[in-house]
Image (cartoon, helix red, strand yellow):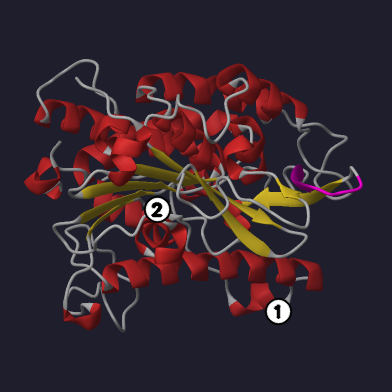
Amino acid sequence: MQIRTRDQHLFDAGPKRLLALDGGGVRGIFTLQYLKRLEALLRERLGNDPSFRLSHYFDLIGGTSTGSIIATGLALGWPVEKLETLYNALAEQVFQKSIWRQGILQAKFPRTPLMKVLLEQFEDRTLGSDDLQTGLMIMTKRLDTGSPWPLMNNPKGRYFDPASKKGKTIPNKNFLLREIVRASTAAPHYFNPERLKISSERNGTFLEGAFVDGGVSPHNNPALQLLMMATMEGFGLKWPVGADQLLLVSVGTGAQELRLSTKEIMDMSSAKVALQALSSLMNDCDAMNQTMLQWMSRSPTAWKIDREIGDLQGDVLGGKEMFSYLRYNVVLDREWLREHLQVDIKPSVVKGLQAMDNPKNMDSLARLGKVASRLQVHPEHFPRQFDI
């Protein structure tokens, strides 16, 4: 199979395909089961070439947190099987609990094991590396300015290789992949923020930013951000919109539904109420992203948003679909799993699977992901006009 370059993916004419990958810690192994299914179906669709990779099909791949690790590996042309092997090893090395680290006075996990793995895998490759076979977007957040930072290898992007009169802004193309992926995965409580040099000043010093997990922004599910970067003029790609022009595939790590009694909330400490509210806010952001994406499309995988607006199949913003949209995910809830996957798991086990930092869940998550991907992902979801 002929491998297209990054610039061919980004700038050649024709329909475009986007892949967005959620954050979720060790639950990234769940995402990989969907991607294995996608890889197998698309390989069969496109001629059964054993060398086929998802980077050959998708023109822009983006991820947040654990999704940024997967997105980077895919953009480098890795098969999903390699990423699955990496994930099993990474989880055991990175999420080693210690009685001295409880995530209160210091981060729950040290930085070194994760950086060691990222260095081994990504070496000294940068965001501008020719080894990236397709478009890549890594979602992080600069906490010292409170601004979401989507970093993309688009040579027409404003900050990919900028000129600055006041100082020397460090081009995005020079950021090391291992450092910006580490920034995207720096979830507060679990890991310390990552320092990144932003610019060199005239006096020889550097301006640095403190970066944390992209999931702290509205884009733990980076699909809407990825769509904006593909179509908005300011980001430099300006891809045409339309159901036959853009295909957006979004893959989750398992959603959680808040189910607490009023008494449980009222009896919580103020600190716990604050944490619960923050968690709820992140769920609200995911729900808003999903609402907007389904409102702008008609999807064969549409999710029920709530009891009032349903799955929005009767609504299209502006009366015309802006893109074709697919969303694959599960809800980590016993009743949902029983109804939709015909899987019955004890409530205590389901609750345990919601943890983002427990490597012991990997096998169970992988088995659940295989069932979900087999039931949810179908060849007819992928319109023929997007074949390569």
Closer to the camera, 245 or 157? 157
Q: With respect to residue 127, does 261 lie above or below?
A: below
Q: Which residue is mark 1?
A: 266
Q: Quadrant of residue 56?
A: top left
Q: With respect to residue 134, does 155 lie above or below?
A: below
Q: Amino acid at mark 1?
A: Met
Q: Does residue 196 show up magenta in the picture?
A: yes
Q: With respect to residue 206, does 266 lie above or below?
A: below
* Majority secondary structure in the magenta region: strand
* Of callouts 1 and 2, the N-terminal one: 1
Report x, y in % for residue 208.
80, 49
Q: Which residues are magenta?
A: 194-203
- Find residue 236 and name its label: none
Q: With respect to residue 24, does 219 lie above or below?
A: below
Camera sees residue 258: no
Report x, y in % for residue 348.
52, 47
Closer to the camera, 115 or 354? 115
Which quadrant would the C terminus be assigned to in this image? top left
Q: Secondary structure at mark 2?
A: helix
Q: Which residue is mark 2?
A: 334
The residue at the point 29 percent across, 81 percent down is: 309
Q: Is residue 333 left or right of residue 120?
A: left
Q: Does residue 55 show up magenta in the picture?
A: no
Mark 1 Cα-neighbour bin, 10 Å: few <14, some 14–19, many ≥20: few
Q: Amino acid at mark 2?
A: Arg
Report x, y in % for residue 109.
76, 36
Q: Is residue 153 left or right of residue 191?
A: left
Mark 2 Cα-neighbour bin, 10 Å: few <14, some 14–19, many ≥20: some
In space, the residues marked 1 and 2 are separated at their CA atoms by 25 Å
